[in-house]
Amino acid sequence: MENFTPVSALIGGGLIGLASGMYLLLNGRIAGISGIVGGLLMRSGSGSAMFERLAFIIGLIAGPLLLLIASPVKATSIVTSPMPIIIIGGLLVGFGTTLGSGCTSGHGICGLSRFSVRSLVATLSFMAAGFITVFVTRHLIGGL
């Protein structure tokens, strides 16, 4: 609880909800990152859909970078895990999003807000997997 920041978490969550709601209302699409990235990599859709996906991904990357530049508080070390662990984790997340037909943003934000039972099961599954992973790596293996 040393990094408990309820105000910024509430504001961030509200902005994510607002952005995903606007994306659905204005574009008729779910703001699921794995679907957006997958469509971009597979080059599926029209030119305007590809531009929209690319702009979405650029915004996801540019937003935190701009905050990092503009923020008076500089993070000294945000990521403390070794690079091989990060790469393996990223590959496992990619496999999981393919297996679960969606990612945390698609199921956890957009799916739950639409009362999707499938998204509820998926969200409970990946949350449970996350809890177990943290417990095993931090308490049983010894903090990778």
Image: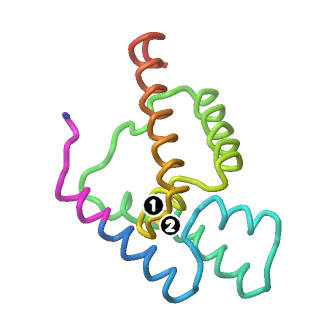
Taking depth in this image into account, of 97 and 78 the one nearest to the observer is: 97
Residue 69 figure quarter: bottom left
SS type, badge 1: helix
Residue at screen point 49% across, 86% down: 25
For mark 2, what is the residue? 62
Is 36 a magenta residue?
Answer: no
Q: The disc labelled 2 sits on which kind of residue?
A: Ala
Q: Is residue 84 left or right of residue 48?
A: left
Q: Position of residue 60 (x, y in %)?
A: 52, 65
Residue at the image position 34 percent from the left and 39 percent from the top: 76
Residue 65: mark: 1
Callout 2: few (<14), some (14-19), or many (20+) C-alpha neighbours within 10 Å? few
Q: In which quarter of the image is residue 83?
A: top right
Residue 61 placement (x, y as % from top left)? 53, 62
Q: Where is residue 127 in the image (x, y as percent from the top left)?
A: 45, 40
Q: In which quarter of the image is residue 38?
A: bottom right
Identify the magenta region. 2-13
- Amino acid type for the residue under numbered disc 1: Leu
Residue beneath the point at 65% across and 35% down: 87
State the SS at label 2. helix
Magenta: main secondary structure: helix
Q: In this view, does 64 lie above or below 131?
A: below
Task: Determine whether 48 is above or below 54 in the image.
Answer: below
- Determine whether, in the image, residue 71 is placed left or right of residue 124: left
Left or right: 41 as drawn, with respect to 123: right
Contact? badges 1 and 2 (CB < 8 Å) = yes
**Disc 1 to disc 2, how far (Cα)?**
5 Å
Which circle marks residue 24 in the picture?
none
| Residue 95 point in image, percent of width and height | 70, 42
The answer to which of 77 and 120 lies nearer the viewer is 120
